[in-house]
Amino acid sequence: MRQLFCWPTFVVVLVGWVVSTRAASQSTEPGPAGEATAAAPLVFERRTERNQRAYTYLAPKSWISQGGIFHVNPLQVNGPGNSILPKNDLVVRRDEAATVYFRFLPVWNYADLRSSPMAQMGMNAFPLGSYYQGMLVRLLPTWEQYLQELFASLHPAARELKIVESRALPELSEVFRRRDQFVLAQLQSMGLPPLAYAAGALVVEYLEDGRRYREALVTALIDARGVAYMWNNDYTLAMRAPVEEAEALRPLFNIIRQSVQLDPEWIVRVSQAAGERAKIARDTLEYIQKIDREIVENRARVNEKTRYEGYLLLTGQDDYVNPYTQKVETDTSDFKYRWTTATGDYLYSNEPQFDPNQVREINNLEWKLTPVRAR
């Protein structure tokens, strides 16, 4: 089950998101509820995906969650190409207008029939925009083209668009290549072309409803045209904020992105429904649990001098010990104090005198500090 909600905790280094907004984000004045500032603690609660209870994630306490797991009816799209596995589309936004939001977008299979026998014979039974076996017929773009088209579909009213940064992410491509190593070996043994991978990130600025925003979009495109005349997107996400808040909200976005925990029992149920895909689903779950270590190992192969501490420093993270589970958790190091509850809620603060156990609105549960792992 290759496409089963593969959310690696891959650290996307977006220079354009960070550098040019740093000077505009030095204010320490308190902001609205859920807004990241130097003075206001950030309270996160662990929420459960509402449609099938498939996973949990952290969200700022006052923010709005929308969407989750859904299914595609094969009768409405001329086939089962996008109906075998469920889809996920989750938005976490600060307000009704979504002036700030984080979104996990669905994995979609597309058909590119240019190398099919039909196309070789000059037949065009499935033109662009039609559906072939439940998949939209669409030519494989570059990752830059895909993200530009995705942005246009998300924000049709955007004006004064400026691309701040466009960056390939070969390490993200390598993550998916390693995930699919069993499939790649099977294809090689049968003399079939391998899958191809291309990943990248786009950072744009634009004007919408009289306000200037900065938005980062990420995706990985997987090319299976040589095997099945198809391709798909994976690990596609979008995050936006007003330009003047972008840098302050960066650690908040990272917390949301890294917090997803899949329910193993839900994965088993989905796997059983998909029959023979059960083993691949278990492999996918193991992949998600091990992805942080794999990234570290990959960096070590590329540069033997890279060390784990340097990785944490480079990515703005540190290791913490959960006082309830005693497990080591890797999380953002942008805040001096990190608190948690037995139910998995988190609070981030830079105030040495702040104690959430003394705050009436949130002291219904016991909060404990998560200390940095002893070196």
Image: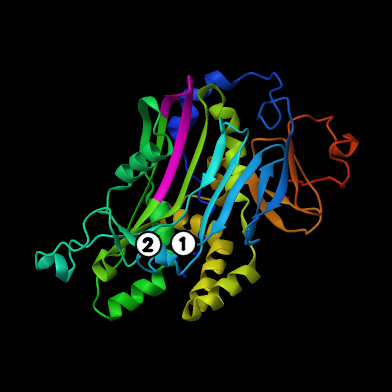
Q: Which residue is outermost to the left?
A: 122
Residue at figure coordinates x 62%, y 68% from the top left? 266
> Is 121 drawn above or below residue 161 in the view shown?
below
Q: Secondary structure at mark 2?
A: loop
Q: Which residues are magenta?
A: 205-219
Using a 10 Å C-alpha cutoff, classify the residue at mark 2 as few (fewer than 14 neighbours), some (14 to 19) or many (20 or more): some
Disc 2 designates what residue? 77
Query: Horizontal placement of 269 versus 33: left or right?
Result: left
**Mark 2: amino acid:** Val
**Mark 1: amino acid:** Val
Q: Secondary structure at mark 1?
A: loop
| Place of residue 88 in the rendered image (x, y in percent of width and height, measured from the top left) | 52, 56
| Place of residue 59 in the rendered image (x, y in percent of width and height, measured from the top left) | 66, 44
Residue at figure coordinates x 59%, y 63% from the top left? 289
Q: Quadrant of residue 221?
A: bottom left
| Place of residue 194 in the rendered image (x, y in percent of width and height, measured from the top left) | 28, 68
Assign the magenta stretch its main secondary structure.
strand
Q: Quadrant of residue 164?
A: top left
Tell whether position 209 is magenta: yes
What separation in Å lies between label 2 and label 1 (alpha carbons)? 8 Å
Disc 1 designates what residue? 72
Using a 10 Å C-alpha cutoff, classify the residue at mark 1 as few (fewer than 14 neighbours), some (14 to 19) or many (20 or more): some
Of label 2 and label 1, which has the lower sequence position?
1
